[in-house]
Image (cartoon, helix red, strand yellow):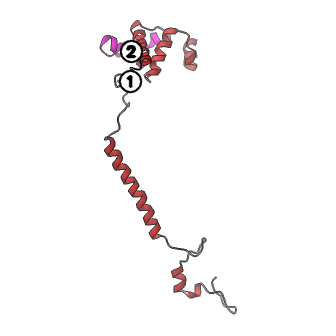
Amino acid sequence: MFGLLRALWRPDLEEDPERTIVAAAANIIQVGEFQLLQLAYHHWYGEDMTPSQSDVMFQAYMLRGEVPSWARHYARSVIASSEKGQLDENSSAYHRYDHDYVTQVPNGMRHFCLVSMVLAGVLVGGLLIGHLAGSSPTSLLPPYFSEEELRAAPELSQPARNGEPGRE
């Protein structure tokens, strides 16, 4: 049990060389170690593990550190393919158990261009409307009177005379 906790806490300090091979192969194709075991089982036997087989395999691998020979073979083939540059880690064959793994952009380049043009149109339109709708205020602080309002009501722009109240 202590070995399991230590491996979970510091997986880089794995002492078992067989499990190190499995971990390295899993890292190369960007999946978990147990998922690599599932892929190896499917590759070797041509079928998926049943839930009971999965439970037995999990206990054997994770708790007792047992690595089946077919899993070592599969892990070594993944590492060898990677070293030769013949491995596509984004292949759907390696991500068959990832239900949310997507490698394609929906609707391709046409969809991207259409959305980009719509966003650019909204941005330019908003700037144009903001420029045309804006008025030129006479001050930065309230009350905001425009030059047209001050020309229409001259008493707003003239200072007070002879003790009469006025606006400045």
Q: Which of these two is toward me, 161 or 131?
A: 131
Q: Which mark is residue 131?
A: none
- The residue that disc 1 covers is 88
The label nearer to you, 2 versus 1, is 1
Instruction: Provide residue 167's location: percent of width, then percent of height.
Output: 63, 84
Q: Quadrant of the C terminus?
A: bottom right
Residue 81: x and y, percent? 40, 16
Look at 49% across and 12% down and name the residue there: 19
Label 1: state its secondary structure: loop
In the depicted structure, whether residue 133 falls above or below residue 151? above
- Quadrant where the image shows the N terminus: top right
- At 55% across and 77% down in the image, what residue appears? 145
* Residue 52 position by quadrant: top left
Element carrying mark 2: helix
Q: Residue at x 33, y 15 (%)?
A: 42
Distance from the alpha carbon under mark 2 to that under mark 1: 26 Å
Lower position in the chain sequence, tag 2 or tag 1? 2
The amino acid beneath tag 2 is Ser
Q: In the image, is residue 111 above or below residue 35?
A: below
Whether the magenta-drawn stretch holds residue 37 is answered as no
Q: Tell me the amino acid under the disc marked 1.
A: Asp
Residue 100 spot, x, y in % from top left: 38, 31
Instruction: Locate residue 115, reporting x and y percent.
Output: 36, 49
Residue 121 drawn above or below residue 26:
below
Residue denoted by label 2: 54
Is residue 132 visible in the rendered image? The answer is: yes
Q: Residue furthest top?
A: 69
Residue 42 is inside the magenta segment: yes
Q: What residue span does the magenta drawing correspond to?
A: 38-62
The residue furthest right is 163
Q: Residue at x 43, y 18 (%)?
A: 82
